[in-house]
Amino acid sequence: MIPGGITGGGPIMNVFVLCTGRSGSASFAKACKHFTNYSAAHESRSRVFGPGRFDYPPNHIEVDNHLAFQLGYLHQRYGNDACYVHLVRDRERVAKSFVRLIDSPVSNVRGFATGVLMRPELTDEELWAASLDYVDVVSANIKAFLRDKTRTHFVDIDDPVEAFLAFAEDIGAEGDLDAAVNTLTTPSNLKLNTAYAQKKNLLQYIPKALKRIAGG
């Protein structure tokens, strides 16, 4: 644990922004770079093995959807001695984004379907169901993790300004807040031109899959 528990507002040592992915995390990290009394990064240690994965510098804001798979380690290392943000986006928009990027070599949903659901082969309609399931599972895990944490914030990337400013005030962030807000509300990491995003047009199957899931 970092020395000194967190009991109220004001400057703190570390901030962790948790999310499913495809929910504005890159924009959030860029926005926080306008803070002058914190460093900020996006997935800066996601490729590190073992406990060293959590060797973040003090006064640092880390935005990384992969932390949702390592919440036990995160709790052991930082527990209540940090501030946490749950960054969200509309569930179906997140799932659609994951479907579009399913051929990425580091697809979260592909890994979830293969390694957790034990479904290495999916029809296009099953892929939509798996994407929704992934979003729901990760979101539930984050909510459970945050249940006993003192310093938490909830930011919806589709309407983020008020919650983001409350977060900035809570951690005593200094710097150009207007620039931070402008950056936050500018989409990043769209991946519109990547080859793996162009291989399949799976979104055509979503309306049919939704109807089938609803029993229609």
Image (spheres, grey):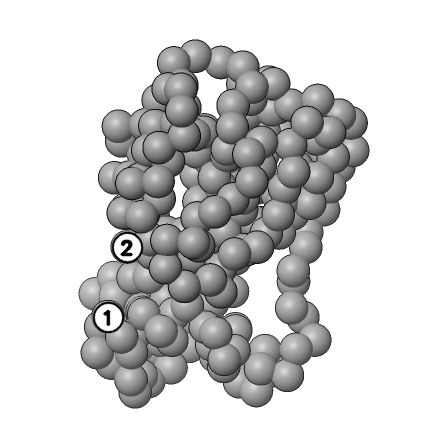
Within 10 Å of the Cα at label 2, are there few (<14), some (14-19), or many (20+) other Cα atoms? few
Which residue is more in the foreground, 123 or 13? 13
Q: Are marks 2 and 1 in contact (CB under 8 Å)?
A: yes
Could you tell me which secondary element the residue under label 2 belongs to? Answer: helix
Instruction: Give the percent coordinates (x, y) of residue 122.
Output: 31, 83
Q: Is residue 87 visible?
A: no
Q: Is residue 66 above or below residue 161?
A: below
Give the percent coordinates (x, y) of residue 67: 41, 52
| Residue 47 seen | yes
In this rendering, position of residue 192 left or right of residue 156: right
Q: Residue at x 55, y 34 (%)?
A: 58
Q: Nearer the viewer, mark 2 or mark 1?
A: 1
Rendered view: 149 above or below 68: above
What x and y, as percent, mark residue 114?
A: 29, 78
Give the secondary structure at mark 1.
helix
The x and y percentages for residue 110 are 38, 75
Give the residue displayed 44% in from the left and 54% down from the top: 53
Q: Amino acid at mark 2?
A: Val
Quadrant of the image occupied by residue 157: top right
Q: Residue at x 65, y 62 (%)?
A: 190
For marks 2 and 1, the one nearer the N-term is: 1
Residue 116's label in the rendered image is 1
